Amino acid sequence: MGVRDILQRIFTKDKKIVLCGLDNAGKTTMVTFLEKGTFVDHTPTMGKETTEIEVQGIRINIADMGGQKDFRSLWLGEMKDAECVIFMVDASDSERFDEARGELMKLSSIIKEKPLIVLANKCDKGNIASLGEIIAALNLQKCPSFEIFPISCKTGAGIVEAFMKIYYKLTGKQLTKKISPKALTVFDKGGVPLTSTSNEDVLQGGLFAAITSFVRESFKTELSQLRLEGNIIIFKRSRHLMGSIVIDDSGNVNIDDAESGLDELLCHLENMCPELEKEELNTEKIEYLVKQYSSNLLN
Amino acid sequence: MYSERTIISKLGGNIGSHPIILTSYPVKDLAEDETKDLLSKCLPDGIKVGEFCIKRYKKHHLISYIFRVEKQEHRDDLFSFSILLHKKYQPDNYTPILKKIIDDLQDNGVLSEEILKDYQQEIYDGINEERDIKIESNLIELSDLFEKVKEEPSDEKPKLKGSFF
């Protein structure tokens, strides 16, 4: 360990959160999504898994608690020195809401004192309970303070928003996003646009045409950036797809961060679309995945 | 090599599962206390797929390899395959053998709870006789691996440290 590492550890503060909820709620999947930026299928958690992540100078220890009945007695003890409690519930499994409420009630002595964040996972599935239904079923209105977020640890939808709230509860500081893209476009490997999403009308007019033509031209060149109309457009290729991201050319944006953000999106799409290996392209699925994932990137 | 016992433990991926010792060979009937003790060592807290775990159990090393068994109907099950090895052996030498058995079953598409139960005697005998194992039509070649890891059991008494004696 070098001096820089030692100093970094001294000036990095430790915070602990406990992640609990019934078995198969998706707790470990969320931790992995935060680490890897994509969905990874898991086996059940044996007892407890601890993961340390560092976000903007704050070291966060996540105690990911096994959800099986045999391990639930461990939850309360683990929470004593935690700054925040996260309770995850499978929003698509209303038959287990009573069981979840029972377990949550056992934590009442702790959640009176500590912030409670409820994550309604699997919101990508059809036939899920609304947040209102979950609040009622879990009797959350009786909790002194809680916040609830719909998320999907499969598609990534809502994860950043929920984590920003958790970060705020831990530190009292707003977590700032490294990049704030104006638009995202995904192309097939031939340069044909498959889906585009933006928070402004930046893709109106000539910009979208310019992006598309540049993507095709970029086959012949090594160029991966284009400056146009006060915007920087960054291009990236993965095995079967291409992507572009539009960011403001204000000089405050770190191009490397934008590139790695786009890279993560493309990796996520490759991971979620194994059919691409067989040269099969499901445009609707890609469109859906980009929309879900981009909720984390676009404001 | 002499393994006194092979043990297979499981935490199912299905809703409402419990960690259990699925099967133990040749000792099949385990007392409740022994089951509890073994289970906490075969599938300890926080253990993950692909990891090895070496614990002391009475006069033995308990060596476990953690793996997943794929399921279509729900998320994958978490398994451990463990052997009880006399403490005079160096446990690290035997972890590749455990991994080889499980990985070969996986690669041949026959890794399942039923196969592990049905062939536990064959696996146990193969390990103790340091020979290849035949499971269904698949030959798991262990003899070469045993040659590589062969070691003389150490009868050397540990040297006493300190100035008391």
Image (tube, coloured by chain):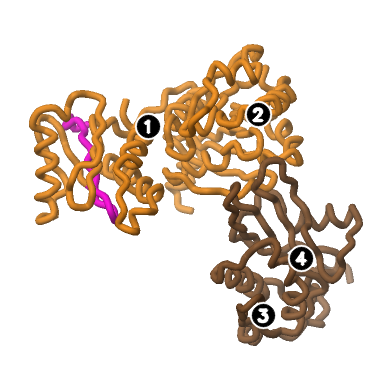
Q: Picture coordinates of residue B151 (x, y %)? A: 70, 84
Residue B113: quarter of image: bottom right
| Amino acid type, residue under disc 2 in the picture | Glu
Badge 2 vs badge 1, beta-carbon distance below 8 Å: no
Q: Numbered disc 1: what chain?
A: A
Residue B134 is tagged as: 3
Q: Is residue A8 magenta?
A: no
Magenta part of the chain: A236-252
Q: What is the three-letter code of the residue carrying label 3?
A: Lys
Q: Label 4: how many residues lie within 10 Å, few (<14), some (14-19) or many (20+)? A: many
Colour seen for chain A: orange
Residue A198 location (% of width, % of height): 25, 29
- Looking at the image, which residue is at 20% across and 42% down? A193
In the rendered image of this protein, which colour is used for chain B?
Answer: brown
> Along the line of sight, which residue is nearer the eye, B57 or B32?
B32
Residue ID at (81%, 58%)? B38
Quadrant where the image shows the C terminus of chain A: top left
Q: Amino acid at mark 1?
A: Asn
Answer with the quarter of the image where residue A229 lies: top left
Q: Nearer the viewer, mark 1 or mark 4?
A: 1
Same chain assignment for discs 4 and 2? no
Residue behind mark 4: B62
Q: Position of residue B71 (x, y in %)?
A: 60, 53
Q: Circle 1 — which element?
A: loop
Q: Which residue is mark 2?
A: A95
In this rendering, is residue A72 above or below B10? above
Q: Chain of mark 3?
A: B
Residue pointed to by mark 1: A296
